[in-house]
Structure formats: structure tokens, C-alpha cells
Image (spheres, rainbow, N blue to C red):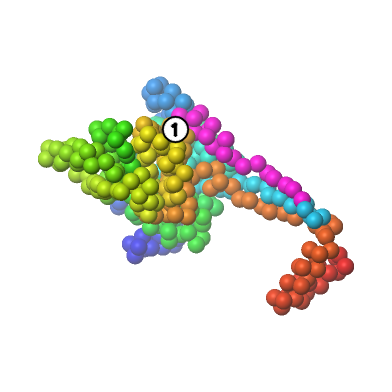
Amino acid sequence: MDKVKEIVNQVIVRGDDALIELTSKFDKVKLINLNATIDELREASDSLSEDVKISIDRIWDQLKNFHDSVKPPNIGGGRDGIYFGIIWRAIEKVGIYVPGGLKSYPSTLMMAGIPAKVAGVSEIYVCSPSRNGKVDPALAYVALKLGVKSMYKVGGAQAIAAMAFGTKTVTKVDKIVGPGNLFVQAAKFLVSDKVGIDGIEGPTELVIIADDSAKPELIVKDLMAQGEHGPSTFLVFISWNDSLLEKVNGILESLSKGNSSDMNFYLVKAKDQADAVDIANRISPEHLSLYVRNPRELLSLVRNTGAVSMGYTPPAIIDYAAGPNHILPTNGWSRFRGGITVYDFLKPIMYADAMSPSKDLVRASITLAKYEGFQIHGESIGERYE
């Protein structure tokens, strides 16, 4: 936190100069311009292979359909002479952080950008570390589809600070969303008193609950798939079936002997299905897989997780194309929030039109205002209606 606080302060004080200097120091990239021009984005996008473009377009349609289906309508009603309701308004300026550098994650830009666009966000800004000062072709293609206002070739804690406070080049936003490493998440936490954030995401977590209908080879494959995120990934397999636990353990041990994996796994023996879900609820994982015969029945017991893979469904398809988001709460945050949806980019504005409220409601308001010591509140109400 101390290191990140120093980085944030440098950006606040020195702006663009700090961004260029810190990018050179941490990413070994000397930036000529922080902002990717539209011509840069088009040139990079044009170099992307057609099959990747087609894949992005297909996944785009699926994700957009998911978020369109959950976008809330404006609602209104009335009671006791008062008309009231909620209108939903989109956040105006959103900053999306996309990890990068050695690898590129266009899926993350879609996961954050599509619900923002469906919500009606008018200005979307993106920060992602570049490769030798150039924007990844797939990121450029998605950015153009999103119609982003600007894409900055900056990563790390310094990118978060720039979007939170603004610099000469980087626009100050109202909310920052997206995953990232420990330094990025620490920076999001530090600036969260100045700008909205979606949460603290990372390291990745997966809990699998399975019965004897599950294939042990697929359980191991799903665990290892999430383990690709790094050695700090939290990987847990829970079952009440001794034979399945032994088979999964045997496969993992053989992988360990072959030195083909540096991942850590936790195997947990539960009493039964209900106990397994209770354990998962206490862990409150990012991803939960219900690899059982009756996943929909078991889903009714789930209270804490970011996203659930049902039955034969691999958790990895949620990372790409199923519809739900892969930007999900970790570190137990699923106890009080979920993954990114259109709701993360909307604000409910409540209203009331009290032209002729009932007399007992008016009298109750005045009485309670006086009880709380707000005499003029009561008078304001009374002079209108009494």
C-alpha cells in the first residue's frame, strides 16, 4: 500500500510526466504518446485475423443479449395520494482497466464495456499497458466497436490514479472497473474515496462441488484452467464421494510428479450435498461449479458466489461467452456484491409527486419530524397540506 500510495501521489502531482516515467520504469516501454489515436486503433484492428474478429462478434452478441435482458425499466406507481417511482440514469464517464503487457485480454474489455454501453454510458475510457507502445489488435477492434472516447497505453497503479484524478491527457472518470494485479487493486482501493470502483478483483478463485456423475478428468481440467491465472489462484474441490475424491487426488498427484503444474489444490470431504454448499457459501468464491446431477436444485442453496457453472458446464465458458461476467468479486466480497452487470453503470433516481397525500400520512410525517427535533421540517409539511 505504501508503494502504491507513492505512485498515486506522483501522478497527482506530476500528471503525464509521471505516467511516462513510471511506464518506462515498470513496463520498460518508452511512450511517445499516452493516447492511442483513432488511426492507431484502426491500423491495429485491420491487422487482426478474420477468425478472431468473427469470434469477437459472435461473443459480443451473446454478452449484449445477456445484459439487454437484465437492464431494468423505469418504474412508477402510487399510493395514498402520492405518485412515486425510480428512473435509471447511466453514469456519464467510466474508466475500464484491462490488464496487459505480455498477454492481451479483449474478453475483459468486452465484459466491462458491453454492459456499460447497454446501460447508456456516454463516455468510455480504457487504460491498458501496451506492447512496445502499440495497442493489441484485438483490444483495438473491441475498442472501436465500443466507440470508446480514448484508449490510453498506460497500465498499473499509475493508470488507476490517472483515471481517478485526471491528467492533461487522461480524462477524470466517475467510476473505474476492471481486474488487475495486486498493485492495480491496491490503487483502486486507495482512490475509492474519490471515484467509484466495482470492487477488488483477484486472485482468481474456483470451488467445484461434484457428485459421482462427474468425470474426474474434467474436474481436474476445470481446476487447472482457472489455475492458468497464476500460482496464487485459489482452487478447491468438494465432494462427499470418497471414490471421486481419490480419483481426482490421484490425477493431481500424477501431475505433480511430472512437474507439469505449480498449482495448489485443496480437496475437501463433505458430509453430503448440503454440507458441500454450506462450505462453499462460507468460502464465498469468485467461481462456483455445481458439477452434479441436480444443479438447479442445488442452486437454491447457494448464497455467496460471483458466478455459478451448472452441471456439465465448464467454468471457463463463463470467462468468455456464456453471458454472465468474468469480472467477479473475490476475497469473500461475494458476501455483499456480485459480478459486473448493467447495474454497475446505472444510478437509481427516486422521485415523489405528493400533490394530495392522505391526511394520516401527513400527520405521521409531522409527528415524527417533531420527535426528531426537526420543527421546521414539520412546519414545511404542515403549511403545504394542513
The residue segment tinted magenta is 59-78
**Which residue carries the number 1 mark?**
322
Asked whether residue 113 is in view, the answer is: yes
Question: Which quarter of the rendering shows the C terminus?
Answer: bottom right
Residue 220, percent across and down?
25, 37
Residue 43, percent across and down?
43, 29
Q: Residue at x 36, y 60 (%)?
A: 4
Q: Residue at x 84, y 56 (%)?
A: 355
Q: Residue at x 72, y 76 (%)?
A: 371
Residue 384, percent across and down?
85, 65
What kind of element bears circle 1? loop
Q: Quadrant of residue 373?
A: bottom right
Which residue is farthest right?
386
Q: Report the front residue among 252 and 15.
A: 252
Looking at the image, residue 367 lies above or below residue 211: below
Which residue is farthest front?
271
